Image (tube, helix red, strand yellow):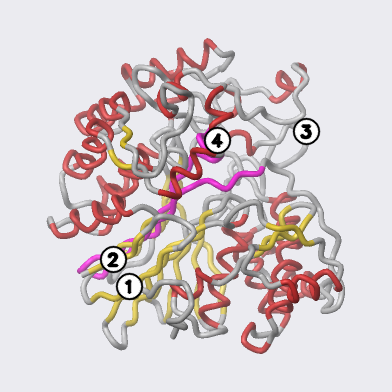
Amino acid sequence: MRDFQQPGRSAAYADRAMVATSHPLATQTALDMLRAGGNAVDAAIAAVAVQSVVESHMTGIGGDCFLIYKPNGKDPIALNGSGRAPAASDPAALRDQGHAEIPRESPFSVSIPGAVDAWAKIHGDHGKLEWAQVLAPAIGFAKNGYRITPRVAYDWSINAEFLAKQDNAAKAFLTGAGTTPGAGDKHAQPALGATLERIAKEGRDGFYAGPVAEEICAYLKDKGGVHTLDDFDAQRAEYVTPISTDYRGHTVLELPPNGQGVNALLIMNILTALGKSFADLEEDERIHYLAEATKLGYATRDRYVADPAHAEVGVDALLSAEYAQACAAKIAPDRALPQRPIDLPKHRDTIYLCVVDEDGNAISFINSIFHSFGSGLMTDRSGVLLHSRAASFVLEDGHPNILAGGKRPMHTIIPGMVMKDGDVVMPFGVMGGHYQATGQAHHLSRMFDMGMDPQEAMEAPRSFADGEVLEVETAVYDQVRAKLEARGQAIAPAKGPIGGSQAIWIDRQRGVLIGGTDPRKDGLAFGY
């Protein structure tokens, strides 16, 4: 139980259904869908559509998504809704233009958005409510406006300079004075609302064919892009078999590559191979061992993880006990491994949500535009802010994650799900770009080693071995930092809150749902 004399919040408790998102309007919308007779799929899509409006710097219809869905009494399914590079993509052409990496603010960073197709697919296969009913709240907020919440206002403010350089995005997200709206200000996106209305009427074709796709292709072509209507028409989400590992007596599910879920599982395997429970360690020791496992896990990810349709990814070998033991053998309690840069662009922007409905169906859902405000490229008439996910590709010949036509980039977004005795006990996820794999291991170790509830686990101070330094939040005490530096960890204050998270624990013995939402965001966990 938390200390009620300290800052923090209590976990949410409910009997029948629970929603956890990073925005109050999204949580409210999802609950409305459940009360209207919808299921977890309906609620999740309605919520993410709302977040595509009210947290549009983090997510949107111009981005990608992944999800894991566990229908009650059936096996879990996973859906890869990540987009592909345009067929005409050519890494040599970009190198000839002098690029060592894919520029964020360019059409080359825009892979075909996969989110809308994935939403339509999972809803068509598993939803209960009418498609238009599910999208109606998002349409209303886009057309009629919504109030800016504090974390959204903060995120927008630190991107004001970036937005000012954009054409249509500056008009959409800056005030007449060239500033970003503040907390409590009202904001609307009528062009996006009209596009959502078109999608509500026409389904996926409202985005991937007709005026919306035509405008996106023309806009990107004008900036030097190679996107075609055929690329948009070919975009399809794919059901995939989840991968898993055992962690502290629970089965943790992730999507297979091209996502970094395998990295999250590898970090958990390394912690297991160390043979140490977080409950038996001091805080500096917990941070040290997690940092060391992170360095090894991310080095492995950057070397091997890519689209398996274009490059072989030995998932079984990476998740073997032998590989985890070999990694753990490199970790010493009294000294730090060298820091190495993460090879891919830094970003910390996405949304994650989860829902458990009255029938026991559970969904773990993540949707992203990669960088904050994505590529910054935004169409005028349709109001679609385009992601920058293709910046995850590399341009190095022979690398498994090299840019290629029709290929999916290595993805950082990873929804998680925990199983016990064959049934789901927790949909969960951690936001924060590269941090997500480390964040999942941190969250589960706090719960399963230290007995924390989901809310307590996500409120615990965070750290991340991010490139050349070990970033630590302000809540990590000075004496802990000093002990870490004595081991050779290069400590640096985090430039902002590290990540965000949501989770719903299903306590089957007591018949109660326990929801948590990260205080680093504006979110809300609530149920009935």
**Residue occupying the point 18% across, 38% down:** 132
- Asked whether residue 248 appears in the rendered view, the answer is yes
Q: Are marks 2 and 1 in contact (CB under 8 Å)?
A: yes
Q: Compared with residue 302, is residue 138 higher up or lower down, i.e. above or below?
A: above
- Front disc: 4 or 2: 4
**Residue occupying the point 50% across, 35% down:** 373
**Looking at numbered disc 3 in the image, what kind of residue is underneath it?**
Asp
Structural crowding at the residue carrying mark 4, measured as other residues with C-alpha within 10 Å and reported as few (<14), some (14–19) or many (≥20): some
- Front disc: 3 or 2: 2
**Looking at numbered disc 4 in the image, what kind of residue is underneath it?**
Asn
- Mark 4 or mark 2, which has the lower sequence index? 4
Give the residue number, with chain letter if any, for mark 4: 159
Q: Which mark is residue 12?
A: 1
- Mark 2 or mark 1, which has the lower sequence index? 1
- Mark 3 or mark 1, which has the lower sequence index? 1
Residue range in magenta is 346-374
Where is the N terminus found, in terms of image quarters?
bottom left
- Asked whether residue 81 appears in the rendered view, the answer is no
**Residue occupying the point 31% across, 88% down:** 509
Report helix, strand or loop for mark 1.
strand
- Front disc: 3 or 1: 1
Separation of marks 3 and 2 at Cα, in angstroms? 49 Å
Q: Are marks 3 and 1 in contact (CB under 8 Å)?
A: no
Separation of marks 3 and 4 at Cα, in angstroms? 33 Å
**Looking at numbered disc 1 in the image, what kind of residue is underneath it?**
Ala
Give the residue number, with chain letter if any, for mark 3: 397
Separation of marks 4 and 2 at Cα, in angstroms? 30 Å
Q: Are marks 4 and 2 in contact (CB under 8 Å)?
A: no
Give the residue number, with chain letter if any, for mark 2: 526
**Looking at numbered disc 2 in the image, what kind of residue is underneath it?**
Phe
